[in-house]
């Protein structure tokens, strides 16, 4: 139907930033990474803090993949798949925007 929301496809050319009111924060007391959002927060684990730490509204997703490929010893294809999956999910949930 007209006006129905269609999720944006995140590609390596996409440049993302945090949606208004959302930000990445390290909770030093509990030593966990959180995404702070209006009236809520959720813990992110694994590679997610490394990925989200590079989301700045200027770097394209492909550049984020390149930086992570240099930082971690994993094949680019694996990193790219993981990064695209995470960023697509968070874009659909309204945490990130293009």
Image (spheres, grey):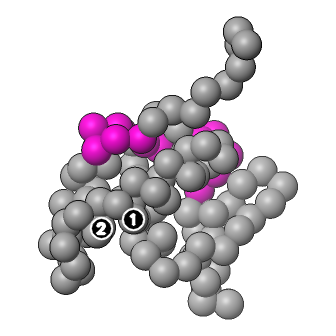
Find numbered disc 1 in the image and state the secondary structure of the residue it sits on: helix
The N terminus is located in which quarter? top right
The reply to whether discs 2 and 1 touch (Cβ–Cβ < 8 Å) is yes
Q: Residue at x 39, y 65 (%)?
A: 82
Lateral position of residue 82 relative to residue 4, left or right: left
The boundaries of the magenta stretch are 10-23
Lateral position of residue 79 relative to residue 21, left or right: left
Q: Position of residue 38 (x, y in %)?
A: 78, 50
Lateral position of residue 91 relative to residue 94, left or right: left
Residue 9's disc is none
Q: Say above or below: 44 vs 2.
A: below
Residue 31 at least partly seen: yes
Q: Position of residue 86 (x, y in %)?
A: 49, 59
Closest to the observer, 61 or 80? 80
Q: Position of residue 56 (x, y in %)?
A: 39, 49
Q: Residue at x 29, y 60 (%)?
A: 80
- Predominant SS of the magenta segment: loop
Q: Which quadrant would residue 6 be assigned to in this image?
A: top right
Distance between the alpha carbons at the discs numbered 2 and 1: 5 Å
Closest to the observer, 80 or 1? 1
Q: Residue at x 28, y 69 (%)?
A: 78
Residue at image mark 1:
82
Q: Position of residue 66 (x, y in %)?
A: 19, 60
Residue with the most extreme bottom position: 30
Find numbered disc 2 in the image and state the secondary structure of the residue it sits on: helix
Q: Residues within 10 Å of mark 1 (few under 14, many from 20)?
A: some
13 drawn magenta: yes
Residue at image mark 2:
79
57 drawn magenta: no
């Amino acid at each position: 139907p007209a006006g129905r929301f269609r999720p944006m496809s995140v590609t390596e050319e996409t440049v993302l930033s945090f949606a208004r009111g959302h930000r990445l924060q390290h909770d030093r007391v509990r030593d966990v990474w959180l995404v702070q959002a209006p009236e809520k927060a959720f813990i992110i684990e694994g590679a997610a803090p490394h990925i989200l730490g590079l989301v700045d509204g200027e770097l394209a997703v492909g550049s984020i993949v390149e930086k992570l490929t240099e930082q971690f010893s994993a094949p680019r294809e694996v990193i790219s798949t993981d990064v695209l999956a995470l960023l697509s999910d968070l874009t659909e949930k309204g945490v990130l925007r293009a």
